[in-house]
Image (cartoon, helix red, strand yellow):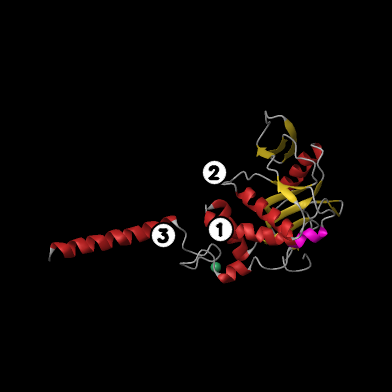
Amino acid sequence: MTAPTLLGRASAAVAAAAVDLVRAVVPVECAGCGRVDIPLCAECAAAFDDPVVEVGDAPGRLDVEGEALMPVWAVAWLDGPVHETVAAWKDAGRRDLDRWARAWMRRLAHEAADALPLRSGLVVVPIPSRSRGRGADLPGVLAHGAVEGLADAGVEAAVRACLRIGRGESRTAGQRARTRGATVTAVGGVGPGPAILIDDVVTSGATLRAAREACEQSGTPVLGAMVLAAAPPLGSRADVGLQ
Ligand SMILES: [Zn+2]
């Protein structure tokens, strides 16, 4: 066995290790179904292509005596590959999905824009995530996608990241509203508005409700909310009667 062969084998081993390392660092499986060597397969991506769902009046959500508090538009129901993909993006550090998330929210805002009562002066207000990764501004990604989608529909809007979320009392001056275990605070005012709230997922609607309250206490009315995915109501099939 010659030295060059040994070196060659060593190089191959290093190269293989490098590939393994890259695979460990760079996601190479579908966020929705685990299919290898693709960040998001066509089938799982297509789960985000259904018509936008309006979930604000779904049972047990943001309703007050049967009246929806505000419209909530979602790209998709939080189910199947959508659930897996959103979890990978939100909780597993799959920042390579940012561009997808931004594009999905852009489409949502474009489609939902028809329902808005005005065409300019909107503020798009992301709700900070309590579980976001270090340095990751996932709500900001969604908010910028929403502004792009509104612009596609001829609606002028700007991102205003003025909400803070945390436990207990905030020492920051501003308007705050309480939800279960959390405080939502509008720091420095929301702006003239009106506002569209942005969140990644809506489940009980408690956070959206608190964020709405914080905005309105600051004098900014809230037209509705746009979210990436909505948890299907308990006891309901997501595909029956709720779209
Ligand atoms: Zn897939």
Residue 16, how many percent across, how many down? 32, 62
- SS for callout 3: helix
Q: Which residue is mark 1?
A: 97
The amino acid type, in three-letter code, at marker 1 is Leu
The picture quadrant for ligand 1 comes to bottom right
Which of disc 1 and disc 2 is earlier in sequence?
A: 1
Which of disc 3 and disc 1 is earlier in sequence?
A: 3
- SS for callout 1: helix
The amino acid type, in three-letter code, at marker 2 is Gly
Label of residue 77 in the image: none
Q: Which residue is mark 2?
A: 135
Q: Is residue 233 visible?
A: no
Q: The magenta stretch spans which residues?
A: 111-115
The amino acid type, in three-letter code, at marker 3 is Arg
Label of residue 23 in the image: 3
Q: Residue at x 62, y 43 (%)?
A: 130
Front residue (pair 38, 201): 38
Residue 76, how many percent across, how many down? 68, 62
Residue 108, how many percent across, how many down? 71, 60
Residue 193, how many percent across, how many down? 79, 44
Gap in angstroms between the C-alphas marked 2 and 3: 22 Å
Magenta part, dominant SS: helix
Placement of the C terminus among the 4 image quadrants: bottom right
Which of disc 3 and disc 2 is earlier in sequence?
A: 3
Query: Local crowd at mark 1 within 10 Å, few (<14), some, or many (≥20)?
Result: some
Q: Residue at x 52, y 57 (%)?
A: 96
Front residue (pair 190, 210): 190
Q: Is residue 152 visible?
A: yes
Residue 82 sits above or below residue 129 on the image: below
Q: Report the side of 53 relative to 15 (left or right).
A: right
